[in-house]
């Protein structure tokens, strides 16, 4: 039999501190929303995952993107997007057409069945969003979007500043070393 022990003060302090970290709260909310959204899609009897839906929507909106560009838009690695695309093709939700200018590459298009699935999911998606955002005023949402955009911008890679040597100063002669 395993004996349970009371958590010590350090563990409780860490848990309390973690809950005060904004990024922890954001991740927690996003993960809970994804579980909630997937559960509602499943209960509606629609055979698609949130990630598959995202890829399908991106292709519907931009059928000229590379897999790398799709991966960036759905926040997945390229291998995951490739697996999702292969599954969507196999299920007939996508179709692949050769590009006229490059026969080696394919343009992905949402099939008729894919459009039907997207149409079936849309009311569930709208309901999920409404439930998740209930009690938040439009001004709150606008401020949240602005704040999240600022965080995103703050985290973009910075272009390094290359300092140049002024032309008037001679460069040191390293031949005597």
Image (cartoon, rainbow, N blue to C red):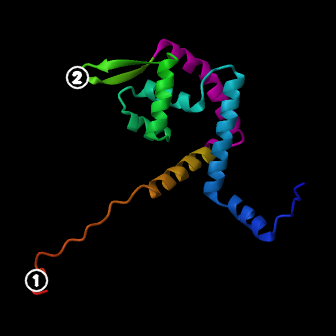
The C terminus sits in image quarter: bottom left
With respect to residue 14, does 129 lie above or below?
above
**Residue 137 placement: quadrant:** top right
Circle 2 Cα neighbour tier, 10 Å, few/some/many (<14 / 14–19 / ≥20): few
- Residue drawn at the location 52% of the way across and 13% of the way down: 113
Q: Give the residue at x 62% y 49%.
A: 27
Q: Which sits in the foreground, 65 or 83?
A: 83
Q: Report the residue marked by disc 2.
A: 101
Q: Is residue 166 left or right of residue 90?
A: left
Q: Residues within 10 Å of mark 1 (few under 14, many from 20)?
A: few
Q: Which residue is at 86% across, 63% downward?
A: 5
**Can you name the residue that lies furthest to the front here?**
1
Looking at the picture, how far across and down is residue 15, in whole percent?
A: 74, 61
- Say if the magenta span includes residue 129: yes
Q: Which residue is mark 1?
A: 173
Which span is picked out in magenta? 111-138
Does the stretch in magenta take in 11? no
Question: Residue 132 occupies which quadrant of the picture?
Answer: top right
């Amino acid at each position: 039999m395993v004996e349970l022990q009371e958590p010590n003060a350090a563990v409780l302090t860490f848990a309390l501190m973690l809950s005060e970290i904004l990024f922890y709260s954001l991740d927690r909310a996003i993960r809970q929303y994804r579980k909630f959204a997937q559960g509602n899609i499943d209960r509606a009897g629609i055979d698609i995952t949130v990630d598959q839906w995202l890829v399908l929507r991106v292709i519907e909106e931009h059928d000229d993107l590379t897999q790398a560009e799709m991966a960036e838009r759905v926040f997945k690695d390229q291998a995951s997007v490739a697996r999702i695309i292969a599954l969507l093709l196999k299920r007939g939700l996508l179709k692949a057409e050769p590009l006229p200018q490059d026969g080696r590459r394919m343009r992905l298009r949402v099939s008729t069945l894919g459009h039907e699935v997207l149409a079936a999911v849309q009311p569930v998606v709208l309901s999920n969003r409404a439930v998740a955002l209930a009690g938040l005023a439009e001004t709150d949402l606008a401020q949240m979007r602005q704040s999240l955009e600022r965080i995103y911008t703050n985290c973009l890679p910075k272009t390094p500043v290359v300092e140049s040597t002024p032309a008037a100063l001679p460069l040191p002669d390293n031949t005597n070393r």
